Image: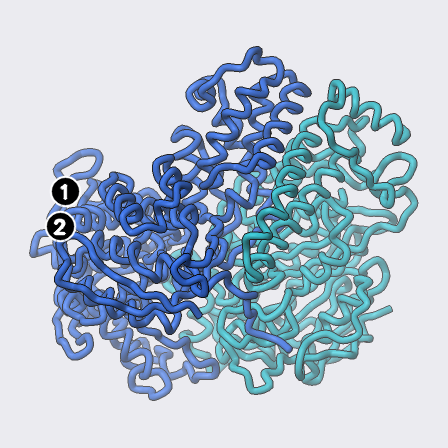
Amino acid sequence: MKRFDRRTLLRGALTGGAVSMGLPLLDCFLNEHGTALAQGAPLPVRFGSWMWGCGMNPDRWTPSSQGPGFELPIELQALDRELASGGKLRDQVSVLSGFDVHLDGRPNFPHTAGLMGTLTGSLPLQDYTVPAPTLDTIIAAEIGGSTRFRSLEMSCTGNPNQAYSYESQSVFNAPEISPMAMYTRVFGPEFADPNAGPFTPDPRVMLRQSVLSAVKSDRDRLLQRVGAHDKDRLDQYFTSVRQLEQQLDILLAGPPALDSCSRAPAPGAESLGAEVGQSVSTNQLMASLLSFALACDQTRVFSMMFSDRISGLRQPGSSSQHHQLTHDEVLDPDIGYQPEATQFVFASMEAWADFVERLAAMPEGDGTLLDNCLVFAHSDTSLAKIHGITGIPMMIAGRAGGAVKPGVHVAGATSPTTRVGLTIQQVMGLNTESWGSRSMEATQPVREILT
Amino acid sequence: MAAALLLFSFAGCSSSNSTVEVDAGPVALRRLTAEQFARSIHDVLGEHITVPSRIDPDDRRSGLLAVGASFSSVTPSGFEKYEAAAAAVAEQALDASHRDELVQCLPATVTASDESCARTFIERVGRRLFRRSLTAEETDARVDIANHAANTLRDFYAGLELGLMSLLVSPEFLFRVEAAEPQPSDPSTMRLSSISMASRLSYLLWDSTPDDELLDAGENGDLVTETGLATQIERMIASPKLETGIRALFSDLYDFKQFDDGLVRKDSALFPVYTQTMVEEAKEQTLRTIVAHLTSEKDYRDLFTTPETFMTRRLGLVYRLPVPTASGWEPYTFPEESRRAGLLSHVSFNSLHSHPGRSSATLRGKFVREVLLCQDIPTPPANIDFSIVEDTMGELRTARDRLEEHVSNQACAGCHSLTDPIGLALESFDAVGMFRDEENGAQIDTSGELDGISYDDAVGMGQALRDNPALGPCLVRSLFRYAVGRDPEAGEEALLEYLDERFAFASYRVTELMREVALSDGFRTTSGPREAEQNGDES
């Protein structure tokens, strides 16, 4: 179908075209099939982060040799899985150890300093504050504009206030906590399956656009009445309005032609909360939905919080949560670690493996969806017992469309964790030459994982 | 900064002829909280509407959603949710069984646009939602949408739905605009405009959008006059909606939204009595107790000693008390042998300030210090040696045993000696607030002291708290912060001290305090719009 024909169809659908709206024009994205992604174009590269709380036991988590072919340490045994698409999961994941968060004399706010240093490149001056934008939002600002959702945020603890995607202290991207709600948002009535027959635009979508343009016309009147603080907030509001307009444009343009796209099956029963079984199951359901959403190019950026920085995960029947155990439980001198707390490290690494495995299970092009992803896993501490921020555990899964080499262990030798964030930005096509502030400023990417 | 003189003169208090100089702080847009969003919709469009509860989460700052609201914006995913909520609300507001009552006019035909009926509707409903009359352009834009959509979809009411949606997603609805203007008596100083005062009063006293009478007063300029303002405050305090305002204030202060959001979770194996329904009733019990106490003009401080409360049979199971009424609520007095009195012996507080699997004397004490007495407790230092609190031999059976290890260590003692003696008095209530004498087979010792006053148990601690000189002033400060949506400025400290005296003089009646705050220059004047937000970093 030619674009002219589709306009005619829209006019017809609107019985006289009474709505005085311009048609959505997305010429820069369109090919002659009117799809938002030109056929034959390279598959998009996606970025996502995956966070787990309260770290690991450094001696038991860190591989003993560097480079490829390292022996999996006990706390990374979860990566020793066979993939349905062939090969081992461990060969899809690089391990980054020995990268530090440097305080420069600033306080080590427990669980905040390590997280924010790694995700924003800056150290907070106050506890529980966000000093700079998180990595996912930096990347979404660059590559999130051509998809229906600029980014998708998810969390597995059932708390809509817990996640770590911030554009600033005041602009918090609240996560989806329910797989069913996530399914409805992405795959509800608005979703169009490119492989399910001809696309018919919904006339109500255009009417919704007219609602948004009325709101935008309120803008100037309102801006005259407020101060600088409020102008910033209103700018953010109107950015969000434009984002939804774009989302509606993309809906009207019809789905991108992607062979591996289909509507996700509805998720099964869900149980939300921070019992470890609940979080593990939510992570699996979300990962599965996400793999379909990515295959349908509904977004190219995501972030997932498996557990919060002060990990509230717990075992049913136990009086203590993961975080409490990391401080209160006896460090068994015979074995050298806290056995009950360490169960949560194992559970977290299994959940990470589940997540990556789901992305690897989605075929795409000549390989899998994971080949076209870069997923960054990290925690807020190394050894949580002492709120350690040296050797923050990090991993990178996927090949980022061929730019990244997985299956490698790199030891950071006390260089800042921001080198990983810098590497990610460069791989994702950003013109970033340095990232982070003060001694967290990184200028050298982690070349060992680049192809 | 603006300096303004404040003159108090209200009925019955002519003895206090005080003058306080106030340098009031800035104003800012205030995003509606989820609760205000829902309540405003119910008040304007109908109680029958189910308002989607998952919108952008509220930001809690300085311990109040009311303060966070002066900083929140709307994220892309948040706006997506607001738009979906607006569609759901508009559809219900104009459904076949409610449209006639709401629209109050009939279109010439239901299958096409009707400009005059649409205009009447948009103007009337728009004024309530925007908390001021719409400008001609604002109305025209909405009427155009309604007309075009009605003709496109061949349905007048479907068109009106889109017109209504465009009101509900507008920043003029989602944010309360607080506008400053020069004072005519001294143009170098600023006050809130009369129409901004309408919203400020309404959300303070009713936690909802102003009614038509208040908007009339705002648009007539009455709310920048002494008598006009006093008249509306009296009317509002006498209204049954004041109860909603009191509930909203204490729900925010006590962070009870956690109950609504289902975030107060307990281990079901350890605490089988604990269910979401039960804990929502526990929250309701506390709010009912507060409202009944305060609206009958009782002393605020006695909330922490009163055995009077309300009970359901389900709550009776947790309290292990007989409840005669089979279903619903009944007024109730804790018997002396229950060893409970005051809000801090309620299931709500003890559940909220506990972990999922165990009580927390530290969290409970921290709540009392920070929220009830307005004293800061620093966060723990990062690199402490936690091995001192490890239970190496399994001999630390009670919370007191474990916490005394903290107090014996210098790095920990500074804070734990402030919080723990309060919280340990509440150790007779487990993580869901059920009474217990023992923990792990050891007798629980609930004795302690609060700022020099000793007690044996939770009831005695409640009395010590009630008599603590910081209790009344802390509520003054909290109410002021709640009212103006920010922390007090240095130039407002004198006003707070004055309000402390007035509160004490009024025998700690909270409705009197609300009146005093609403009449004060801290509430009515401002330094002007807030400058750009400082983010804490980074140059």
Q: Secondary structure at mark 2?
A: strand
Residue furthest out toward the top = B109
Q: Position of residue B60 (x, y in %)?
A: 44, 59
Cα–Cα gap, marks 2 and 1: 8 Å
Q: How many marks?
A: 2
Label 1 neighbourhood size at 10 Å, few (<14), some (14-19), many (20+)? some
Label 2 neighbourhood size at 10 Å, few (<14), some (14-19), many (20+)? some
Q: Position of residue B250 (x, y in %)?
A: 30, 54
Q: Please, what is the three-letter code of the amino acid marked with disc 1?
A: Pro
Instruction: Determine whether A278 is above or below B93 in the image.
Output: below
Quick check: marks 2 and 1 in contact, CB under 8 Å? yes
Chain bearing mark 1: B
Q: Is residue A228 left or right of residue A20?
A: left
Instruction: Determine whether B2 is above or below B311 in the image.
Output: below
Q: Position of residue A361 (x, y in %)?
A: 74, 49
- Residue that badge 1 annotates: B331
Q: Secondary structure at mark 1?
A: strand
Q: In this rendering, does residue A154 appear at all?
A: no
Q: Residue at x 53, y 27 (%)?
A: B91
Q: Residue at x 47, y 48 (%)?
A: B176
Q: Residue at x 37, y 86 (%)?
A: B411
Quarter of the image where the C terminus of chain A is located? bottom right
Q: Residue B308: which numbered mark, if any? A: 2
Give the camera-side residue of A383 and A76: A383
Q: Please, what is the three-letter code of the amino acid marked with disc 2?
A: Glu
Q: In this rendering, does residue A70 appear at all?
A: yes
**Chain A's shade in the image?**
cyan
Answer with the quarter of the image where residue B458 lies. Answer: bottom left
Q: Residue at x 45, y 18 (%)?
A: B100
Q: Is residue A40 left or right of residue A174?
A: right
**Chain B's shade in the image?**
blue
